[in-house]
Amino acid sequence: MALLVTLTVAVLNGPVALADANDGELFGYRLGDRYIVGPDTSAFMIGLAGHDAMRVVADQAVMPDDFSEVQILCTVGTCQIGAISGIIKPASQQEAIETADRYLRLLRKLYSDWPASNDPNGQIVTLRKSPYVIQIMRFQMPLEVRVNLKFDRDAAENAAWTTVLERESERYQVEARRRLVEDAASKGLK
């Protein structure tokens, strides 16, 4: 039975539904679902392992007050969600450390059956229970803390999402080249 995780007053300034990572959900979005792009959606293209992807600033995120935004990594055609990232912009390095530690303690408590590992630099803590991975990431430049949910790289769900990413990226690149050729032709260039 899926458990809806609620951040309590002890952690934040009031109860806020975070979601259940066991179901691939975080901040009101689910991995593998399609993100609906609206007229005011802020998005930018990124390269991901040699393929085009899109990073979207979520319009309707359900997030605790200390998060400044939620970003969604999705495919360029159908906007299928491959990762969800909540971003906190602390005022100081000390606040970044305390915030990352607070969320790490919370997530370790909520997902105690997810094995944890630390990167060698201590900047990233990963909780993994296939097919999902939760990461707490602390960066110095720019100063921010991220809470990420994505597919485990070895999971079938990640392979399926990557296949969609590759197919849609190839179509996007072909279309972009076609538009460039048409634009050049309309200007008399060959």
Image (cartoon, rainbow, N blue to C red):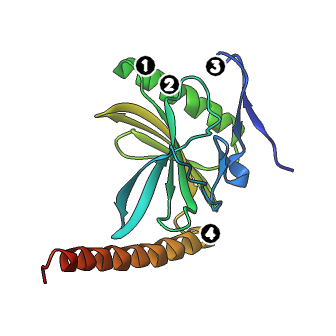
Mark drawn on residue 99: 2
Q: Which mark is residue 12?
A: 3
C-alpha span from label 3 to label 2 = 11 Å
Q: How many marks?
A: 4
What amino acid type should be assigned to the residue bearing mark 3?
A: Leu
- Residue 85, given in percent of the width and then of the height, sits at 51, 44
Q: Earlier in the sequence, mark 2 or mark 4?
A: 2
* Category of crowding for the residue at label 4, using alpha-carbon neighbours closer than 10 angstroms: few (below 14), some (14–19), many (at least 20): some
Label located before the other in sequence (3 or 2): 3
Image point (37%, 57%), residue name: 45
| Mark 1 nearby-residue class (10 Å; few <14, some 14–19, many ≥20) | some
The image shows residue 70, relative to residue 160, as above or below, that is: above
Q: Are marks 2 and 1 in contact (CB under 8 Å)?
A: yes
> With respect to residue 114, does 146 lie above or below?
above
**Cα–Cα gap, marks 2 and 4:** 30 Å
Amino acid on which disc 4 is placed: Glu
Q: Nearer the viewer, residue 157 or 70?
A: 70
Residue 95's tag is: 1
Q: Secondary structure at mark 3?
A: loop
